[in-house]
């Protein structure tokens, strides 16, 4: 049984993660951390340094502001961390990398097992199709409350393609001011915002007389919760180092 400390247990992902763990015979939340009030079936603390229970892994869905205390606790207690929070500064990313030299760390722009499987699939597709003249476009769609564009997941997918193609691609987010034929060595990334779309990502390989499309649709936030718990089960007991969801999906 993997024992989990859940940071951000009363946040947007709180109920989803708690339900996934409750339905699992392999995991248990032994303590939560959140500055907000709420009811939980485990003890909840305002800061992680107050946690008294021992654990095998930390799942963090809180805020970049909590990073220092989480890293301090993790390195002191030698507890691996699954970082599901986004919006870290470059300085904080450096701190995460430094901490990974002491304890296992896993960070991903998207915790969905499906998206990370798609990332592996498009790397294979890019290796075959890019060299045969196929243009590559990414279209992402999210709800109207999402502030950033393009999404971190769209960039994750673009980076997966680029890493498989020796980094030759430039990312283009807007063609409205350009009057030229599409260059070959670019990936166009388009963002759609509307309604309550949880997350929709489509990778398009457009060649002469044929198009290959690989698409992922998230219908609820449960997919991110499931991925986070799978990552926690994977990371528990791992040696120090930086891991990603690619390691989880194999």
Image (spheres, rainbow, N blue to C red):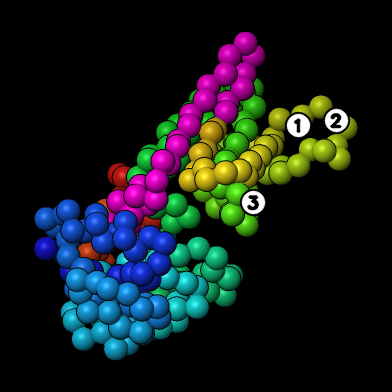
Report whether residue 163 is seen: no
Q: Earlier in the sequence, mark 1 or mark 3?
A: 3
| Magenta stretch bounds | 204-229
Residue 219: which quarter of the image? top left
Residue located beneath label 3 in the image = 149
In the image, residue 192 lies at what x, y percent? 63, 41
Select label 3 or label 2 by which is in front.
3
User: Hey, which residue is sitting farthest bottom in the picture?
Assistant: 50
Q: Is residue 188 left or right of residue 15?
A: right
In the image, residue 40 lies at what x, y percent? 24, 72
Kindly identify which numbered label has been placed on residue 180. Answer: 2
User: Residue at left 34%, top 63%?
Assistant: 14
Residue located beneath label 1 in the image = 183
In magenta stretch: residue 158 = no
In the image, residue 179 lies at what x, y percent? 88, 32
Q: Residues within 10 Å of mark 3 (few under 14, many from 20)?
A: some
* Structural distance between the alpha carbons of marks 1 and 3: 22 Å
Q: Residues within 10 Å of mark 1 (few under 14, many from 20)?
A: few
User: Residue at left 45%, top 37%?
Assistant: 217
């Amino acid at each position: 049984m993997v024992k989990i400390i859940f940071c951000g247990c009363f946040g947007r992902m709180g109920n989803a993660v708690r339900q996934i763990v409750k339905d699992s015979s392999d995991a248990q939340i032994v303590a939560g951390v959140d500055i907000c009030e709420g009811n939980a079936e485990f003890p909840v603390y305002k800061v992680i340094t107050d946690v008294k229970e021992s654990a095998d892994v930390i799942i963090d869905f809180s805020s970049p502001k909590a990073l220092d205390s989480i890293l301090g606790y993790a390195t002191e207690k030698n507890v691996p961390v699954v970082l599901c929070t986004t919006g870290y500064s470059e300085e904080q990313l450096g701190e995460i990398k430094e901490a990974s030299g002491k304890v296992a760390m896993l960070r991903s722009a998207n915790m969905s097992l499906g998206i990370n499987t798609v990332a592996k699939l498009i790397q294979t597709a890019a290796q075959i199709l890019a060299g045969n003249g196929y243009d590559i476009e990414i279209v992402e769609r999210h709800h109207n409350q999402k502030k950033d564009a393009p999404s971190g997941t769209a960039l994750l997918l673009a980076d997966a393609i680029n890493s498989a193609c020796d980094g030759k691609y430039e990312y283009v987010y807007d063609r409205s001011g350009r009057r030229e034929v599409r260059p070959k060595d670019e990936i166009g990334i388009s963002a759609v915002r509307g309604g309550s779309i949880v997350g929709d990502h489509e990778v398009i390989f457009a060649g002469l007389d044929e198009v290959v499309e690989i698409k992922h649709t998230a219908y609820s936030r449960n997919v991110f919760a499931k991925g986070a718990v799978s990552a926690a089960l994977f990371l528990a007991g791992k040696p120090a180092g930086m891991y990603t969801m690619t390691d989880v999906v194999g």
